[in-house]
Image: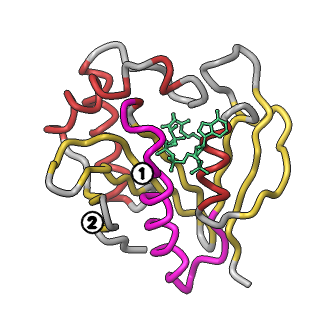
Amino acid sequence: MTPPECLESSRLILRPPGQEDAPAIFDGYARDPEVVRYLTWPVHRDLGDTRAFLDSAERDWTRGKSFTWALTERGDDTCLGMVGFRPEGFRGDMGYVLRRDRWGRGYMSEAAGRLLDWLKAQPELYRVSAVCDVDNHASARVMEKIGMQYEGIQRRAMRHNIDEEPRDVKSYAWARA
Ligand SMILES: CC(C)(COP(=O)(O)OP(=O)(O)OC[C@H]1O[C@@H](n2cnc3c(N)ncnc32)[C@H](O)[C@@H]1OP(=O)(O)O)[C@@H](O)C(=O)NCCC(=O)NCCS
């Protein structure tokens, strides 16, 4: 699959992230324990962690392993968060993160919804799924708002920073009719 480098919505532009985004990502959200609470990746300790992540994101895009977009507001190129898609044949998973001072404005529903619209238009894709921690109500709501269907709970399926033990996750998906 060859996703577009840029996806636009009314308030946002999704574009490829680069090393120049490292400080905005590190200071904006990757070092914030509140943001990574329900995520699998550990809080970044320094800019080196963020730079290593950006390297792997670029490699993964080139290899077609996963695609990650930086989320920016129209008129300001600062990276405020990310949306990503990992294809696996006829299906794939979505993920997303946003810096805390931009929560609650509908940004992620707009960004993830835009990505999902593009994915739905790819005839080779039959299923796009995403999971969130059972206590991550904002993320569950985003998936509902963009039209993914709730499919149930996968018990003890993911390790999140909130807990030493694996957590139950809610599973959502869009599937081609
Ligand atoms: C999840 C996240 C991306 C949401 O981003 P956002 O831009 O604030 O999301 P939106 O504004 O588009 O929608 C959030 C919805 O959740 C609702 N919400 C937020 N906190 C909530 C809570 N504690 N309980 C119930 N609903 C909640 C909001 O009211 C909104 O719904 P509404 O439009 O019906 O009112 C953001 O909180 C985030 O980055 N969290 C940390 C990283 C993360 O958890 N990523 C997802 C991993 S699965």
The residue that mark 2 highlights is: 5
Which of the two residues, 47 or 38, is positioned nearer the viewer here?
38
Judge from the rendering whether residue 90 lies leftward or rightward of residue 49; answer left or right. Answer: right
Percent of width and height locating residue 176: 69, 80
Query: Which span of residues is magenta-colored?
Result: 101-128
Please tell me whether residue 91 is drawn above or below residue 171 in the rendered image. Answer: below
* Ligand 1 - quadrant of the structure image: top right
> 41 or 100, which lies in front?
100
The residue under the point 83% across, 43% down is: 154
Q: Residue at x 30, y 60 (%)?
A: 11
Tell me: is circle 2 under 8 Å from ligand 1.
Answer: no
Q: Which residue is mark 1?
A: 107
Q: Looking at the picture, does residue 155 appear above or below residue 107?
A: above
Q: Amino acid at mark 1?
A: Tyr
Location of the C terminus by quadrant is: bottom right
Mark 1 CB within 8 Å of ligand 1: yes
For mark 1, give the secondary structure: helix
The secondary structure type at the circle numbered 2 is loop
